[in-house]
């Protein structure tokens, strides 16, 4: 049997088995899901095959304790991801986690877990990710993890672990990324700040130069004007504007994620659900405002969220200086005595003089009205229906009753009829992900009822221009992804009055650069991402030019007189068909094929780089049959998915699984 034929048969067999598995659902799993989801926690499949499951206590964290883990006991071997962050789970409770032998990801951040709890994790041989941020673990505790050879990432910020402890563990787990955060030594390093741009030299004038304006300007060396420094109040004129621009949209007077408000000084010092730890005067190391700002951008606790405007290095340095000097709300800049590392940044911020009026905070979204008991009951009923379909309907965040819908695990069955089940609660849904589902333009009627909808994924669906006019009327829609859909310039033109829209993705559609620019000109702040054109793709994937033929044929070499030291002749490049066959035979067909490791999330960095090169080579090859542009599009999807996985993007593996469509590729491009 040919490799590609064998692969197709294998895929069909796997799909058939998956279908049979769904028909014969595990009663223990069904019982556990019903029990868990009824409490407000969440237990969902990690993939459509339902072989492994993801648990999170996000929405019930403040009340979730050791006893809550009992609901998972009957399916312990099927739990692959466990999120216990911010819960009341104790060291003793982790004894129940020890039974989860296939656990790959474990979140314990912001819990009371200590060294004793890590005794229960020593046998989790499949564990790849462990977050112990802000726990009580020490060097002695993490030494117990040295036998977990598959660990790839361990987060230890704000714990009792030292550099020596990290070094000792790193010696035992050389392939793991161990993040222990900033040290006192790091804090002592000066932070680079942007020096103010020197003013251009004034031309020689016949009359004496006019006196400088009242607003002080920084000098070329970034020095503060003394008069401004005496009048400027650090909190009012420097700190409050920074927080208003970067924090208040989520932590304001109305919207207060994590029960935290930052719209005024009193609220900042009060803190949120963690207590008065947001700003601790003269203790920047433990002040959560800085702790979270300095976390890696991919960390769940990093603030602001990675898709929001970030604090600059200069702003972080200023916040640290303010906290270390006492976090006063009345002290002037001069009284606080700026250090050399922040003086230039302060000069730049105050270059235009003191604000005439208070700096306006970023406009906050109106707070949703609390749900009535009848609405809560209705949402629970619809949520149960979504769970039965293997879709997910849950609160957008811990402190809101607004909802998000995801159908990643039900995409092959989820269509217009299923979406219509949300009609009774449409006004409460703010995020919807229907990527790769079976919905059509008819879905626009239900989506149009979601008047609070802010984010909508429709990529790789049957949606077209016909449905866009109804979506354009959504008043709060800020993000829309139409990648791979049959939409054109005429279709997206309907969004000319959609003032809330900020991001529109139209890769691999009929939208042109001209159409994108025309829409951007009509909607302030909108960015339309068209992706690469066919010409750009062709240029990136074109094989290198063949070397020029020799002017005259070289004389036939006499093998008897051949120079034994001469370098062997270079082998000719493999034909396109050979490249494709080799890729299928080596990286798709075997039981331990690289493709399967990537799909299962177990491929290491070197293997991911190999997989990327394979697909790039295939993309540059000519398929045995079918349209070259379609072939390039399929391979570009594989390349993009692998790059997402390399970047630790959570959407990478689902995107890869969707792109590895053997049946579609064989039917269009496999030679008969």
Image: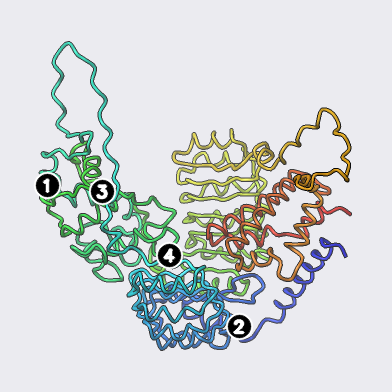
Residue 12 vertical position relative to residue 442 in the rendered view, above or below: below
Q: Which mark is residue 29?
A: 2
Q: Which numbered disc flags the more N-terminal residue, 2 or 3?
A: 2
**Answer yes or no: do the residues labelled 2 and 3 have beta carbons within 8 Å?**
no
Q: Which residue is mark 4?
A: 300
**Answer yes or no: do the residues labelled 1 and 2 have beta carbons within 8 Å?**
no
The span from disc 1 to disc 4 (Cα, nearest Å) is 37 Å
Question: Residue 196's quadrant in the figure?
Answer: top left
- Report whether 572 appears left or right of 105: right
Quarter of the image for the C terminus: give it.
Answer: bottom right
- Report whether 443 appears left or right of 297: right
Q: Which numbered disc flags the more N-terminal residue, 1 or 2?
A: 2
Q: Secondary structure at mark 3?
A: helix
The span from disc 1 to disc 2 (Cα, nearest Å) is 64 Å
- Report whether 497 appears left or right of 607: left
Q: Secondary structure at mark 1?
A: helix
The span from disc 2 to disc 3 (Cα, nearest Å) is 51 Å
Residue in view at x 76 percent, y 37 percent:
546
Circle 1 packing at 10 Å, graded few (<14), some (14-19), many (20+), is: some
Q: Which numbered disc flags the more N-terminal residue, 2 or 4?
A: 2
Q: Which residue is mark 3?
A: 241
Q: Secondary structure at mark 4?
A: loop
**Answer yes or no: do the residues labelled 2 and 4 have beta carbons within 8 Å?**
no
């Amino acid at each position: 049997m040919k490799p590609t034929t064998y692969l197709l048969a294998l895929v069909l067999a796997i799909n058939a088995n998956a279908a049979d598995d769904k028909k014969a659902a595990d009663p223990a799993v069904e019982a556990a899901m019903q029990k868990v989801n009824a409490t407000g926690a969440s237990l969902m499949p990690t993939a459509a095959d339902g072989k492994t499951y993801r648990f999170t206590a996000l929405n019930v964290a403040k009340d979730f304790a050791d006893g809550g883990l009992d609901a998972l006991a009957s399916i312990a071997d099927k739990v692959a991801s466990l999120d216990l962050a911010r819960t009341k789970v104790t060291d003793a409770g982790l004894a129940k986690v020890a039974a989860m032998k296939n656990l790959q990801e474990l979140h314990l951040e912001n819990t009371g877990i200590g060294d004793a709890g890590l005794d229960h994790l020593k046998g989790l041989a499949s564990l790849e990710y462990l977050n112990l941020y802000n726990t009580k673990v020490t060097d002695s505790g993490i030494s117990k993890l040295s036998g977990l050879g598959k660990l790839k990432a361990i987060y230890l910020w704000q714990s009792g672990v030292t550099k020596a402890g990290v070094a000792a563990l790193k010696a035992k787990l050389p392939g793991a990324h161990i993040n222990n955060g900033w040290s006192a030594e790091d804090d002592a390093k000066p932070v680079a700040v942007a020096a103010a741009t020197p003013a251009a030299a004034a031309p020689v004038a016949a009359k004496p130069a006019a006196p400088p304006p009242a607003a002080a300007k920084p000098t070329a060396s970034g020095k503060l004007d003394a008069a401004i420094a005496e009048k400027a109040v650090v909190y009012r004129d420097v700190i409050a504007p920074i927080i208003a621009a970067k924090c208040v949209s989520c932590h304001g007077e109305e919207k207060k994620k994590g029960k935290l408000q930052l719209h005024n000084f009193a609220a900042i010092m009060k803190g949120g659900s963690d207590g008065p730890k947001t700003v601790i005067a003269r203790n920047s190391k433990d002040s959560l405002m800085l702790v979270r700002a300095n976390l890696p951008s991919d960390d769940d606790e990093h603030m602001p969220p990675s898709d929001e405007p970030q604090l600059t290095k200069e702003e972080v340095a200023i916040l640290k200086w303010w906290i270390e000097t006492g976090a006063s709300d009345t002290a002037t800049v001069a009284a606080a005595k700026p250090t050399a590392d922040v003086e230039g940044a302060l000069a730049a911020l105050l270059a235009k003089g003191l604000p005439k009026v208070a700096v306006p905070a970023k406009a906050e979204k109106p707070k949703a009205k609390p749900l009535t008991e009848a609405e809560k009951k209705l949402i629970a009923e619809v949520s149960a229906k979504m769970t039965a379909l293997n879709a997910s309907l849950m609160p957008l965040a811990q402190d809101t009753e607004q909802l998000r819908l995801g159908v990643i695990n039900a995409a092959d069955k989820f269509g217009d009829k299923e979406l219509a089940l949300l009609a009774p609660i449409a006004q409460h849904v703010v995020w919807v992900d229907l990527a790769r589902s079976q919905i059509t333009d008819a879905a626009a009627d239900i989506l149009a009822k979601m008047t609070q909808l802010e984010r909508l994924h429709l990529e790789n669906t049957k949606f077209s221009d016909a449905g866009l006019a109804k979506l354009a009327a959504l008043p709060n829609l800020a993000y829309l992804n139409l990648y791979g859909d049959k939409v054109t310039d005429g279709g997206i033109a309907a969004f000319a009055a959609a003032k809330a829209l900020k991001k529109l993705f139209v890769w691999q559609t009929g939208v042109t650069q001209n159409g994108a620019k025309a829409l951007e000109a009509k909607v302030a702040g909108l960015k339309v991402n068209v992706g690469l054109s066919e010409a750009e793709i062709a240029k990136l994937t074109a094989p290198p030019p063949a070397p020029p033929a020799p002017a005259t044929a070289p004389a036939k070499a006499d093998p008897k007189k051949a120079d034994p030291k001469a370098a062997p002749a270079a082998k000719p490049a493999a034909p396109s068909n050979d490249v494709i066959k080799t890729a299928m035979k080596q990286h798709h067909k075997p039981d331990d094929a690289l493709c399967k490791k990537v799909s299962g999330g177990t491929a290491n960095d070197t293997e991911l780089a190999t997989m990327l090169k394979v697909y790039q080579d295939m993309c540059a090859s000519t398929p045995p049959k079918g349209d070259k542009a379609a072939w390039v599009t399929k391979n570009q999807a594989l390349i993009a998915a692998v790059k997402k996985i390399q970047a630790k993007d959570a959407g990478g593996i689902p995107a890869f699984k969707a792109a590895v469509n053997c049946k579609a590729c064989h039917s269009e491009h496999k030679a008969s």
